[in-house]
Amino acid sequence: MPSIVPRVSWIVKEKMRKRFRKCRIALVRLRYLIVFNLWSGRSPREIEPILHVHNTTVYRVAKRFCEHGEVSLWDHRENNGAGKLSEAYLGILNQVVRSSPQDHGWRRPTWTRELLVATMVRKTGVRIHVATMSRALALIKARRGKPRPRVKCPWHPAVKTRRLNQIARLVASLPRNEVAVYEDEVDIHLNPKIGLDWMGLGQQKDVLTPGQNEKRYLAGALDVRTREIHWVEARKKDAWLFMDLLKKLTMVYVHARVIHVILDNYKIHSSHVIGIALANFASRVRLHFLPPYCPDYNRIERVWQDLHSHVTRNHQCSGMTELMREVRYYLRKRNRQTLKMPAKRAAA
């Protein structure tokens, strides 16, 4: 069968093979391979299963090669002018994604790619395809995720800032004979928290639940210097749980002149029982309350998030005893790793 592409000399073929080996563009390399296979005497139908392309693609590449030669194998889209996804366009898109559609006059509360395209047309006058919007979102590293529910702090912003600055200064200028910890409680449920996990194609993993839920509660304190965490456990989340933690802190930091406890405004932290306990501690323990509904400023919250990720989420424990054993193992392992880090940094 005669080839549908013109024959060329051996020198021209060698030069084309060298340019093929240096090329890193997949589509251009595919066109080269189509021409090479046609020169080898293969028909478009034979090339189709080899290169996994349709035979019409083979005919189209062959026709362009006959008309324009080797230059037809290369992509000429770079001659179309400046790209639409400029730095200015991506900068505006980043600002738009970080806002809400309702900030731009839309009634819908969540973004879609089509809505982003329409909004960007209003702001820049540039219209792109929805598929190009997906590429633009990847360039600015945007992602689809679940928003975090939050409660607005009832304090005036100036009062809130003043309190946070006071706590920051306390931690930054902490004397050697004093200790500061971040305190919070966490709930441990026997019924596992359901979280995201990798699964195979067509697979949906099962998480067995005991049905009848059971709870345990931890009160923890995170040392601002060593990052070590101290905790106590109980079956009830009440003032006695918090008081047990304060007693443990006084025993752990027996040589500390003052123990500063940074905590939230949960009701058990300001109960009558705690007031009596603080009087008995002879001012060794001082409570510093964060502004209401400001969990981001309590550093121990991240520890509890990691605890759920490593232990309680999608867990397979059959009973509370086994689950609490896993919780204690994780916290002790975390303390060992945390205490090793300063030694490694000092050795380096």
Image (cartoon, rainbow, N blue to C red):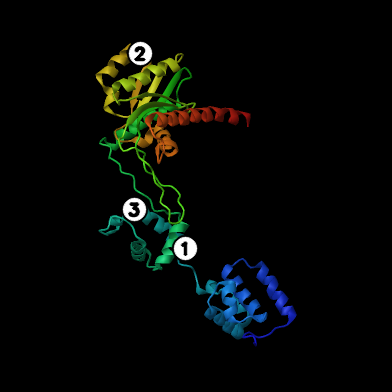
Report helix, strand or loop for mark 3. Answer: loop
- The residue lying at 31 percent from left, 55 percent from top is 110
- The residue lying at 32 percent from left, 31 percent from top is 215
Query: Upstream in the sequence, badge 1 or badge 2?
Result: 1
Residue designated by label 2: 281
Residue 139 vs 220, above or below: the answer is below
Q: Quadrant of the N terminus?
A: bottom right
Which callout, 3 or 1, points to the residue nearer the camera? Answer: 3
Q: How many marks?
A: 3
Q: In the rendering, which numbered label is found on residue 86?
A: 1
Q: Quadrant of the C terminus?
A: top right
Q: 307 and 10: which one is in front?
A: 307
Residue designated by label 3: 99
Report x, y in % for residue 255: 46, 13
Answer with the quarter of the image where residue 242 lies. top left
Report helix, strand or loop for mark 1. Answer: loop
Which callout, 1 or 2, points to the residue nearer the camera? Answer: 2
Report x, y in % for residue 157: 29, 37
Disc 3 marks which amino acid? Ser
Disc 2 marks which amino acid? Phe
